[in-house]
Amino acid sequence: MKVSPRTKFWLVTMFFFVGLFFVKPGWIGLNDTYEDSVFFGWIIAGSIAISMVRCPNCGTPLIFQGKIGGIPLIIAFANKRCKKCDHDLTSID
C-alpha cells in the first residue's frame, strides 16, 4: 500500500499517541523507576519515528520548518510542501 509522506506522518503520530495511552506511567503495574523509563523511552522512540518520515525527493524531515539564525527549526506538525525542494507531500509518488 502506497501512501503519501504526509499520511505516513499522521499514521506514525497516531500510533505514537495510541501507544502512549498504553504505556502511561501507573498503568503498567511495575515500580515507578521502570514505569518512568518505559515512558521516557516511548517519548524518545516516538520522536525518532516521527523525524524519520522524510520528503521522498530530497530527504528533508517533514517536521523541518526552516532555519532561524542557522539553527534548524523542527516543529511536530507536517508540512504540505517540502521546505527545501517544494515537493508536494500530499501526493503519492
Image: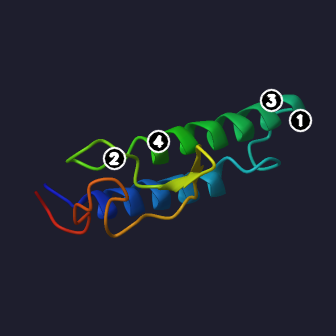
Q: Earlier in the sequence, mark 1 or mark 2?
A: 1
28 left or right of 20 in image: right
Residue 34, numbered circle: 3
Q: Residue 80 sits in which quadrant?
A: bottom left
Q: Please name the residue shown 87% across and 29% down the image.
A: 33
Q: Please name the residue shown 37% across and 59% down the image.
A: 83
Q: Residue furthest right?
A: 32
Q: Residue 78, position in %: x, y?
A: 43, 64
Judged by depth in the image, the label closer to the viewer, 2 or 4, is 2
Residue on which the image places disc 4: 49
Judged by depth in the image, the label closer to the viewer, 1 or 2, is 2
Q: Earlier in the sequence, mark 3 or mark 2?
A: 3
Q: Residue 46, position in %: x, y?
A: 55, 44
- Whether label 1 touches label 2, CB < 8 Å: no
Q: Earlier in the sequence, mark 2 or mark 4?
A: 4
Judged by depth in the image, the label closer to the viewer, 4 or 3, is 4
- Whether label 3 touches label 2, CB < 8 Å: no
Q: Residue 73, position in %: x, y?
A: 58, 52
Up the image or down, 59 lies above or below 14; here it is above
Q: Amino acid at mark 4?
A: Ala
Q: Amino acid at mark 1?
A: Asp
Up the image or down, 81 lies above or below 5; here it is below
Q: Residue furthest front?
A: 69
Circle 4 crowding by C-alpha within 10 Å: few under 14, some 14–19, many from 20: some
Circle 1 crowding by C-alpha within 10 Å: few under 14, some 14–19, many from 20: few
Using the image as rendered, state which of residue 73 and residue 31 is in the foreground: 73
CA gap between label 3 and label 2 equals 32 Å
- Whether label 1 touches label 4, CB < 8 Å: no
- Whether label 2 touches label 4, CB < 8 Å: no
Q: Earlier in the sequence, mark 1 or mark 4?
A: 1
